[in-house]
Image (cartoon, helix red, strand yellow):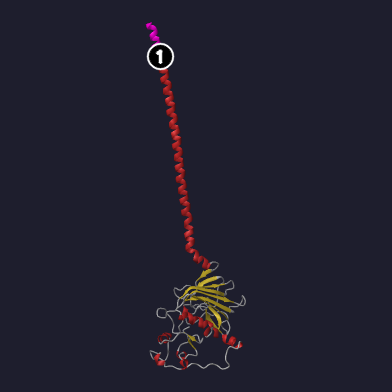
Amino acid sequence: MKKKMNYLILLLTIIFMVGCTNVEDASNTDAETVPEEVTTVESDKNNEKEETVTSDVDESVVEETASVPVAEETTTQPNNELLSGYKLIEVDGGDLSGYRESNVVVDIGYGDREYWAFTNEYGQLVRVIAEEIILQDDSSEPVLSSGRYYSDEAKVPGIESDVLDEGHIIADSLGGVSNAYNITPQDSTLNRHGDVAYMEQVIRSAGGATNFEAIITYPNTETQIPSSYQYTYTLMGTEVVDTFDNVNPDEVNESLGLTGSEPTETTSSNSNGDISSVDTNGNGQVTIKEAKSAGFSMPITSDHWLYPYMDDRDNDGLVGE
């Protein structure tokens, strides 16, 4: 009996040991399996994080890269639009050569002024623009006694005619230079006493102008003598458009029957005056500065009583234009 009990105890012990071994194996298997699953999940999460970070960096780089050209384009866009299709060159303001390059743009403003002149493929001056017309300042600029920046104007082909002047698109008094990119052969009467002279006087009286544009038209592609001009500018908020042909306005008016049969008499204010009240240094000559100080508006024309006492170096009938 005792022997049977021993066998029973041994059998139970073996069964217990086997059961523990299976549990331990199952436990080990579970332990190995779970970390693998956890590792896989964590790895996936890490991958997602890495993908998210990489995506954020890429988008940032793309946005940063894209923003640089846009900023540069915005900075240079106004100049590109203004000068598009033209070669920018520099020409001395007092250059007397009448030659013009084709398809170029030149700054014809004296000093720091920016007045842009454009030529076409035939070297014809066809357009002049200025955001702001700044009047000549003889108190701070080297203005000659004639009221000009330079003693002479460019010799553009055509000005050798007896009835044509070296006409400025933007006059000295309005801050323009005297090279070929600001000069066209212009009817003398139109330039000295006609619409051009009147327009310049109006702008001077207003203290300048804004949004200035001159369009110059030619009868053909071979001549440098314009057939007409159109000026557009803004005075004190009002846009003005002046269009006129490059002809003698007196002859046109006469042909239209708009002039009287007898010449008008010269007004007394232009026929005489006291030179001593203007000639402050008593040398018998009147300078632009002296005339302005005495209250006279420029230009002084050839029919003005002051004209004989002033220096009209280019003999165009105007002093201080």
Taking 13 as reference, is 89 left or right? right
In the shown orientation, is residue 111 left or right of residue 219? Answer: left
Whether residue 321 is in magenta: the answer is: no
Q: Give the range drawn in magenta.
A: 1-14
Secondary structure predominantly adopted by residues drawn in magenta: helix
Q: Is residue 226 visible?
A: no
Towards the viewer: 116 or 39: 39
Q: Which amino acid does label 1 sit on?
A: Leu
Q: Nearer the viewer, residue 202 or 87?
A: 202
Classify 193 as above or below 72. Answer: below
Say if 150 sits above or below 116 in the image.
below
Query: Along the line of sight, which residue is nearer the eye, 190 or 261?
Result: 261
Q: Total marks drawn?
A: 1
Q: Is residue 155 above or below residue 54?
A: below
The reply to whether residue 12 is visible in this rendering is: yes
Q: Can you give x and y, in whole percent of width and height, for residue 282 in the image?
A: 39, 91
Q: Pinpoint residue 130: horizontal percent, then vertical percent.
A: 49, 73
Image x and y of residue 292, in percent: 42, 85
Q: Where is residue 250 in the image (x, y as percent from the top left)?
A: 57, 87
Q: In which quarter of the image is the N terminus?
A: top left
View extreme (top): residue: 1
Graded by Cα atoms within 10 Å as few (under 14), some (14 to 19) or many (20 or more), the crowding at tag 1 reads: few
Q: Residue at x 45, y 48 (%)?
A: 57
Disc 1, SS: helix
Q: Which residue is drawn at 52% across and 71% down?
A: 105
Against 72, residue 41 (above or below) is: above
Magenta region includes residue 5? yes
Q: Name the residue under label 1.
A: 12
Q: In which quarter of the image is residue 275?
A: bottom left
User: Which residue appears at 42% of the width and 20% of the height?
Assistant: 21
